[in-house]
Amino acid sequence: MSIRTNVWGPRVRIGIYCEPRFSGLVPRNHLRSLARETLKLGGAQIPCTLTLAFLGDEQLRDLNQEFRSVSRTTDVLSFPSRTLDPESRIPHLGDVVISVPRAESQAKHGHHGLSQELDLLVVHGVLHLLGFDHDTRPRKARMWRIQIEILRKARVQQGPSKAAK
């Protein structure tokens, strides 16, 4: 499994891995930019690195079982870390793993496009890496408020035609 890493500015590195079968469905540059914006608005300490992985339901089910003892697939898992990246020696915030088939299904049921669903899952997963959670009403309200702000800003930057798809 190889990870494509691109540097967005000298202080934030976001690696992206996408299973080849989903390659045409995942807008890497846009999602990398969205993750960067999430880090900024979520109050991340920089420099930092993180990884986004786009996989299938089987892998998410296996990870969910291994790390959460839940034997079913899920849409997104976040694995926070506070280790140093071995190459750059800067803090690695962790990994966000997203099920592309689950995102497709949720997009269909939500009557919006796959791109919008992936946007939500990336923002949600990165916020978890930053310590946000939705385990209590106040924490959920805070996390949802920040998600909405980031997604609204991303749609404005994309322009109306892309946001509507």
Image (cartoon, rainbow, N blue to C red):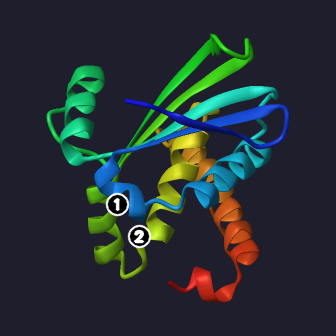
Q: Which quarter of the picture shows residue 10? A: top right
Q: Residues within 10 Å of mark 1 (few under 14, many from 20)?
A: many
> Label 1 belongs to which residue?
103
Q: Are marks 1 and 2 in contact (CB under 8 Å)?
A: yes
Secondary structure type for disc 1: helix
Query: Image point 71% across, 82% down: which residue?
Result: 159
Q: Which quarter of the picture shows residue 160? A: bottom right
In the rendered structure, the answer to whether residue 58 lies left or right of residue 135 reads left
Query: Along the polypeptide, which appears first: circle 1 or circle 2?
Result: 1
In the rendered structure, the answer to whether residue 21 lies left or right of residue 17 reads left
Whole-percent x, y for residue 104 in the image: 31, 66
Secondary structure type for disc 2: helix
Which numbered circle lies on residue 114? Answer: 2
The amino acid type found where label 2 is placed reads Leu
Whole-percent x, y for residue 12 in the image: 76, 34
Query: Image point 62% across, 56% down: which residue?
Result: 29
Whole-percent x, y for residue 14 in the image: 64, 37
Cα separation between marks 1 and 2: 7 Å
Q: Is residue 36 above or below residue 110?
A: above
